Image (cartoon, rainbow, N blue to C red):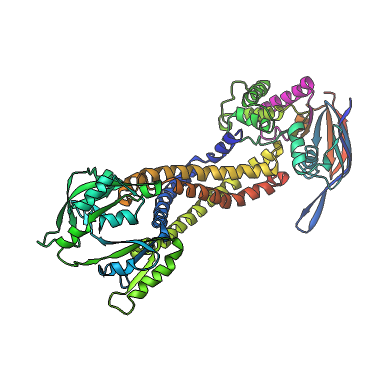
Amino acid sequence: MSSLIEIKNLSKSYVRGKQSIEVLHELSLSIPKGDFVALMGPSGSGKTTLLNLIGGLDQPTRGEVSIDGKRIDQLSGNALAAWRARNVGFVFQFYNLMPELTAERNVELPLLLTGLSAANRGKRARIALEIVGLGDRGRHKPKELSGGQEQRVAIARALVADPTLLVCDEPTGDLDRKTADEILRLLQTLNTEQGKTIVMVTHDPKAAEYAKRILHLDKGQLVDDVSNKG
Amino acid sequence: MKYFRLVLAALFAKKIRTTLTLLSLVMAYLLFGLLQAVNVLFNSAGDSFSGATRIVTQSRVSFTQSLPLRMLPQIESVKGVQRVMYQQWFGAYYQEPRNQLVAFAVDPLRLKDVYPEWKMPDAQWQKFASTRTGIILGRQLADRFNFKVGQQLPMNSNIFPKNDGSKLWTFEVVGIYDGKDADAQRQTGVMYINFDYFDEARQFGKGGAGIYISKLAQADDAERVAREIDAMSINSPEETKSQSEKEFNLNFVRQIGDINLIVNAILGAVFFTILLLTGNTMAQAVRERIPQLAVLKTLGFTDSSVMWLILAETLLLIGIGAALGMALATVVGFGLAGFFQAAGSIVDARVWAYAAGSVLVLALVVGLPPAWRAKRLKIVDALAGR
């Protein structure tokens, strides 16, 4: 498989007050297209920071991040925003849906940045909701949905622009075991059947079992890389 | 347009708060519409006349003090003066004191020459000149009370009794004049009485008129003519003060106080309140939605587009409130049309234009700080709750 994500000598430091804290240190990593990677490690190990850098939400202090051959560490501002809109779908622990919009309108949000007509946007949003099993819930607002359903809507929103890469930050962290398993199976299906490359941060070893590969981080460095044959 | 639903949804995310803010805006703009209408009316009090092509001469003491009619040939002799008329405030009301009317006693033919903007059939001008008890009415005034030509009109004066002691005068409507253009048409709330009859029949003040109005051959002469007219009466018991008609009209209105200052002070207070109110609403709205704004940026919305969304939300909030408030003010303005002798609602297109301008300025002032904050928002920090 060709490599989708290429990370070389990646370092990231934050300045808190007068102190500079290095969260990632000279990290190198390659993730092939179609992989499903779980990032694990203790709090403060740099998992979310790494995920943010892969997703183009933050910029590294040093090093390179290439996604599908594109050096996103060299992009800034509007170019990086446009790149995110086209290439990455995000799933958060707390769903982060717009409470005042219906499920369908939430899913449609990334498509507002495209030139699609309103009819086409609606159609694609409904298809995305069908994919996550919520075809009949499009007109419901987030508060009318369960936690699992909200996360499915968030996944539909991540999928709707058909990105190559899904980055998920603790996608099951706020769900009970049963619902979490349903969500993870959905992610697994998206990976195996639609070929989406998924990078998922999790604390939960059971959640990590759904991934094809488990990376362990500690103190900003990659300490273990385990292939999970399930 | 595709972002409209997003902006609208964000605006009404907190329905009660937004509704209350909107109600406040509606009330503020209702007040703004009516006050600004008064401002515009007062500012344009002298604008619609020919301005410096007419000079008004009054007693230096006060325009309530009459000037003798013997001054007429003297004023007429001043170089540059084309025609002179004199007029006396009648202090009219119709049926009840609350129906105050603007009425002047004038020489009909002099009025016709000095005010060419009044349009009336020649036959009616002649009848006005030849009918001692004749009066002519402006179109607005006639429409307001449904007065018709040929009608006998009993009119009270709160100043002048007749020789028999009665303050009830009876006139015959001999003509209805209109303005030659839209501006003049807006000023047709005045009634003119035949001076000769009035002067003969009034109990006191005979042989005097409140003001002289001189029509000039050239506008450039105004200052000189005014100076020369006033020079003629210097050190006499009837010293005069001449000024442009516009200035006279404004000063007349300002007798009751500096209307513009009062209105502007109230408007200032209104806008300061709106500023605090909507500013607080928008700041709070953005503060509460920081994670959502971060998500929008995550999805690919640029910093600038998020900033514009907040500005659009502010504009929509103030715009809806202003539109409703101004619509209400326009309706109320129709009710006040009679009082201000306006053709339609006193809240006209000019007042709406002021309102539109104020909405844009307010939206910018109120929306910019939270919009700027949204623009500067760092996704990673916002998502982490920092």
Majority secondary structure in the magenta region? helix
Camera-nearest residue between B126 and B138: B126
Q: Which residues are magenta?
A: A169-198
Res. B288 visible in picture: no
Can residue A181 be found in the magenta stretch? yes
What residue is rendered at 35% in x and 51% in y? B187
The x, y position of residue A218, in whole percent, is 84, 42
**Residue B271 shown left or right of residue A84 in the figure:** left
Res. B41 visible in picture: yes
The x, y position of residue A7, in whole percent, is 87, 38
**Residue A214 shown left or right of residue B76 in the figure:** right
Number of numbered discs on residues: 0
What residue is rendered at 22% in x and 48% in y? B127
Camera-nearest residue between B193 and B159: B193
Residue B69 falls in image quadrant: bottom left
The quarter in which the N terminus of chain B is drawn is top right
